[in-house]
Image (cartoon, rainbow, N blue to C red):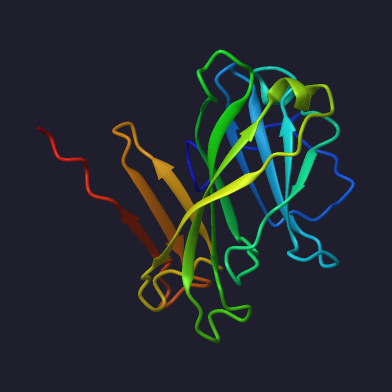
Amino acid sequence: MADPTEPTEIEGAALARDVPSVGAAALTRLPDGRYLLGAWWEDGAADPPGRLDLYLSATDDFRDGFSPEPLRFPFPAVGERKPAYQAISFLAPERAGDGTGAAVRLYFVGTENTSKTSPFTNGANVADLFAIEVDPEALAAGGGATPVAEHLLTRELRLESEWGNLDAGGGVHVGPDGLLSLYSCYHWRMNDQFRLTELHGEPAPRS
């Protein structure tokens, strides 16, 4: 993505799945250099339907492939809402607990609009934050305890009409200064414009 107008495909990173459909994906680098890939999908026969599949890269180069079988776990409802995320992101992976074990704790952000027919009917643009703990060594061995997604908070975001909708696109970025930004786009061009909205928090005050 050095040139966003001409993205380059990274060969060798294809993933074979028993469930072909993936609604959203996220990739992060773990403290040991390997990569964790998350694939979000929805199982229409389950309640709630959200599923997150976790794959671990074989080496610190994800072109060498990922674990053939994912660690699959159901995602919880958020109150009365059953998430159907359009985009997901992983943030801040770090050693869990006192930092001496293999387990990794990271944050998961999922974004969506709560209307199933957005933008034709209004819904809320929401971002959910979860904490997830996973053991990469157990994942590499094809087992391990099913992770638990701990819901930390939900934020409803104000996006001006035709300037952003989290069912069209969304994402999260953390800059070198630690400032978190969330961005969204709209479903289609308006007046021949490709419209984006960026939201970010205020920098921490300096003492």
Quadrant, the C terminus:
top left
Where residue 185 sits in the image (x, y, percent)? 46, 64
Q: Is residue 118 left or right of residue 144?
A: left
| Nearest the eye: 196 or 129 | 129
Q: Is residue 175 left or right of residue 207?
A: right
Measuring 54% from the left and 35% from the top, which residue is drawn there?
106
Residue at image x 84%, y 27%?
142
Q: Name which quarter of the figure residue 140 lies in.
A: top right
Q: Residue 118: name its quadrant.
A: bottom right
- In this picture, residue 184 sits left or right of residue 106: left
**Compared with residue 165, is residue 122 higher up or lower down, i.e. above or below?**
below
> Where's residue 144, x and y in %?
78, 29
The part of the image, by quadrant, that contains residue 103 is: top right
Taking the image as shown, residue 193 lies to the left or right of residue 90, namely left
* Above-or-below relation of 52 to 126: above
Locate residue 75, reporting x and y percent: 69, 54
